[in-house]
Amino acid sequence: MNDELILLKCGEISLKGLNRRRFESILLSNLRHRLRRVGSFSCQILQSTVTVSCLEQDPPEALLLGAPSLMDRAYDECLRVFGFVSAVRARGCPKELPLICELAAEYLREPLSRARTFKVESKRADKSFPYPSPQISAEVGAFVLSRFPHLKVDVHNPDFTVHVEVRDHLAFVHGDADPAAGGLPVSSSGRGTLMLSGGIDSPVAGYLMARRGLRVDAVHFHSFPYTGERARQKVEELARLVGRYAGDVDFFVVPFTHVQEVLRDTCSPEYFTILTRRFMVRITEAIALSRESGCLITGESLGQVASQTLEGLLATNCVAQRLPILRPLIGMDKEDIVAISRKIGTFETSIEPYEDCCALFSPKHPKTKPKLPELEREEAKLDVEGLVREAVEGTQLTLLRYGRD
Ligand code: ATP
Ligand code: MG
């Protein structure tokens, strides 16, 4: 048993009133699932804070080799679990002031030795604890000063802050917390079906919607042999990277060559791109409905390319008959999207130069303001339902299980 702990503060779910129990149980189950790949941990929730403790010792040979400890790895995982606003490593002791003082000086020895100024902030969640917060801070502060005489108190802009939390069972001591992943626990909002290309945008869209509590299925349209095996692998890798936050991702690859060839051979070239999009939406909706998914998700952003004008969006919206299309990037600039993509680690893979099927057969002058009657006239030349059915039937599913492959 390792005596260091991780404290995770719940975010929005603390506001969920009657639903809170349900959210907390999903959150804990996601966290436990996540930590199982690292080792044996116990996770308890109390007063909107989850305490994670490690139930095994680090193997001595791993420590000798300088490998990250079980706690280091668990902490890294915790920072990517949606539903927590902050995370910090801490140690606990019985709720007695002298013990709290000793613990602060001992556990935080290193940062306190490095700092020139410090302050103590205390919180008393257990109101039966006999000392009010300012008194706890004053006592711990005086003790720290006696042990680290080089330090000065600075309550406004300290180099280091000692935090003391007196909670129900124990008192905890720690430094400043790190921001955690935020959002709502994955699955608490249901399931969504992400249209995942190999570009920068759609992985970010998947991440953002997982952050709002959706479990994410990913659907990729692949036009073999025009788009090669490496292109498919790249998108699978992106789905895995999204899974570092979203957890398990079910990854669907739709054979799209026949649809695109039929469109190329039958329809007017200027409509090619938007008609392609309409087929993608129909096929994705059919897959989504078979999975009890409640929405489609795309990486579209208003005005970014010819098919993402208001008219283009209308043309794709109206073929989704039963599910809403969520477009979390709709109001974002490319540079904001790139910043998120770098932060979540998908950018480097997204910019690998493999063609997406959208670039295939694409016309020099795509229609930027397609009219619905014109699109419907073009589609009247095709067996739309048959093409959708054929594509859905040929779809291949790979279960990407986070941490297990
Ligand atoms: P991205 O960077 O995500 O590729 P983009 O700016 O290149 O987006 P488009 O190529 O116009 O935009 O695609 C718009 C959206 O359509 C994508 O964000 C994605 O959701 C979906 N999409 C495009 N191509 C595919 C594909 N091959 N498979 C699945 N979805 C796709
Ligand atoms: Mg694209």
Image (spheres, grey):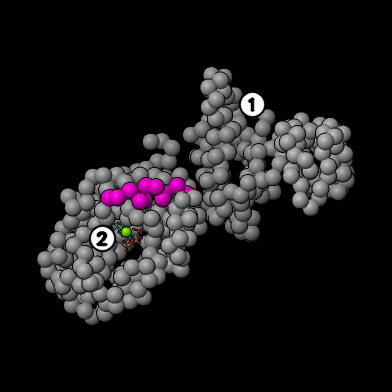
Which picture quadrant has residue 286?
bottom left
35 or 290, nearer to the observer: 35
Q: Is residue 68 left or right of residue 239?
A: right
Q: Is mark 2 within 8 Å of ligand 1?
A: yes
Which structural element holds mark 2? helix
Which structural element holds mark 1? loop
Residue 158 belongs to magenta span = no
**What is the three-letter code of the residue carrying label 1?**
Met
Q: Is mark 1 within 8 Å of ligand 1?
A: no
x and y percentages locating residue 245 in the rendered image = 48, 47
Query: Residue at position x 48%, y 55% from top?
Result: 339
Query: Residue at position x 56%, y 36% from top?
Result: 74
Q: Is residue 204 visible?
A: yes
**Mark carried by residue 396:** none
Q: Quadrant of ligand 2?
A: bottom left
**What is the three-letter code of the residue carrying label 2?**
Cys
Q: Which residue is mark 1?
A: 1
Which picture quadrant has residue 240?
top left
**Mark carried by residue 358:** 2
Q: Which residues are the magenta region?
A: 344-354
Residues packed near mark 2 inside 10 Å, few (<14), some (14 to 19) or many (20 plus): some
